[in-house]
Image: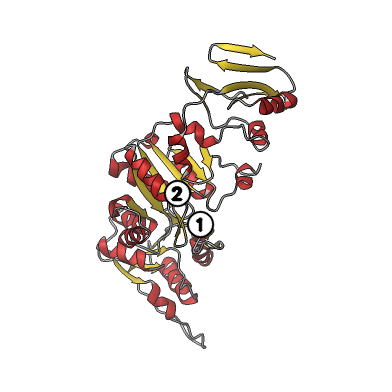
Amino acid sequence: MRCKTNVNPNFIVLKRDMSKAYDRASDESNGVLKKLDRARKVSVNRIFLHFTGVIWKGDKLIDGVPETLDMLRSKGKRLVFVTNNSTKSRKQYGKKFETLGLDVSEEEIFASSFAAAAYLKSIDFPKDKKVYVVGEDGILKELELAGIQYLGGPVDGEKKIELKPGYMMEHDENVGAVVVGFDRYFNYYKIQYATLCIRENPGCLFIATNRDAVTHLTDAQEWAGGGSMVGAIGGSTQREPVVVGKPSTFMMDYLANKFSISKSQICMVGDRLDTDILFGQNGGCKTLLVLSGVTSLSMLQNPDNSIQPDFYTTKISDFLSLKAATPTRFIFVLFSYESITWQVAVKPSLSYIRTLRHRSRGPFSLIISPFLQITL
């Protein structure tokens, strides 16, 4: 299998499936072009940004975020902030952005709490039915704004079940949907109540805001994510939920329709492979992975990882170096490695060229420009 390139007289852009050999060799030389640098020629007019691991960790901004957002806006890029965290409503997240010194409007924010309410509205959820919420205040506020009746939420975190002979828990037979999100007040009462609604109320929907395994509640470590709550309810009901957050396409379809934009003109920026990057890929968007959150470079390059972003970089502020960088002539190297011919764009670096020449198991060529080829 040969990798292909798009070539113009000024710049060489590699397709994302460039080569394992390039990834290995790139760790050995500082002369190799980072993957994000190849994004210069990618045309998008709207950028979707995940919150945690991209913009902040816990309550701390990641370095360079304010300047990066300002630069992207100055270039005419429309920003949309997307998160699977359902603990807050859009309005509440707007206040967090403001607290951190970021100017982000409520219309630019889309949390999975909002997605749950939007999904119920999209299917014309009956007005006489209620939603039982296993989750926090964000879901309740978005349901209220959508005019949907609800019960449960944080108040049920204080309830306990007294298991005595003959005891049977009562539940509301008018519950037509159970929405499960991240819940720091999760308990056995909620598991049982949600289970009864889903199993015993005819047609009751099981909706999950997300199935994230872990989340960043603080910048010190990873914490169990909303997927652990969804898994508990799924285990007791033996039902699969409708997932409205990433990587489900519901939120992507909703946003593309709302902004009347082609998905090919969107770039999804996130720190998770199995949610953010897969979300973008499922929606037909460009994808950029940042290594400032959950995913490390070793995880990305693990042979068992099947989810590969179009681009990756250390952190979102690397966009600033792209803006500041001056055009550079690149050497286009063709070489044989493990019986496969690879094509690699690199900055001029004699040491790196020697590394590739040493690794080569066959023809080795340099293309100094699209019109001049030197065979070594």
Residue 250 visible in the snapshot: no
Q: In this rendering, which labeled residue sits more in front, label 1 or label 2? A: 2
Vertical arrangement, residue 330 with respect to residue 159, above or below: above
Identify residue for label 2: 64
Q: Return the residue nearer the eye: 16 or 263.
A: 16
Vertical arrangement, residue 353 with respect to residue 180, above or below: above
Amino acid marked by disc 1: Asp
| Other-residue count near label 1 (Cα within 10 Å), few / some / many at <14 / 14–19 / ≥20 | many
Q: SS of the residue at dot 1?
A: loop
Residue 146 occupies which quadrant of the picture? bottom left
Is residue 376 rendered to the left or right of residue 120? right
Image quadrant for the C terminus? top right
Residue 91 lies, in percent from the top left, at 30, 60
Identify residue for label 1: 212
Image quadrant for the N terminus? top right
Is residue 95 rendered to the left or right of residue 225? left
Amino acid marked by disc 2: Gly
Vertical arrangement, residue 182 with respect to residue 9, above or below: below
Instruction: Pick whichever of labels 1 and 2 is earlier in the sequence.
Output: 2
Residue 52 lies, in percent from the top left, at 46, 55
| Other-residue count near label 2 (Cα within 10 Å), few / some / many at <14 / 14–19 / ≥20 | some
Residue 296 lies, in percent from the top left, at 59, 49
Residue 19 visible in the snapshot: yes
Is residue 106 rendered to the left or right of residue 345? left
Q: Return the residue nearer the eye: 373 or 89.
A: 373
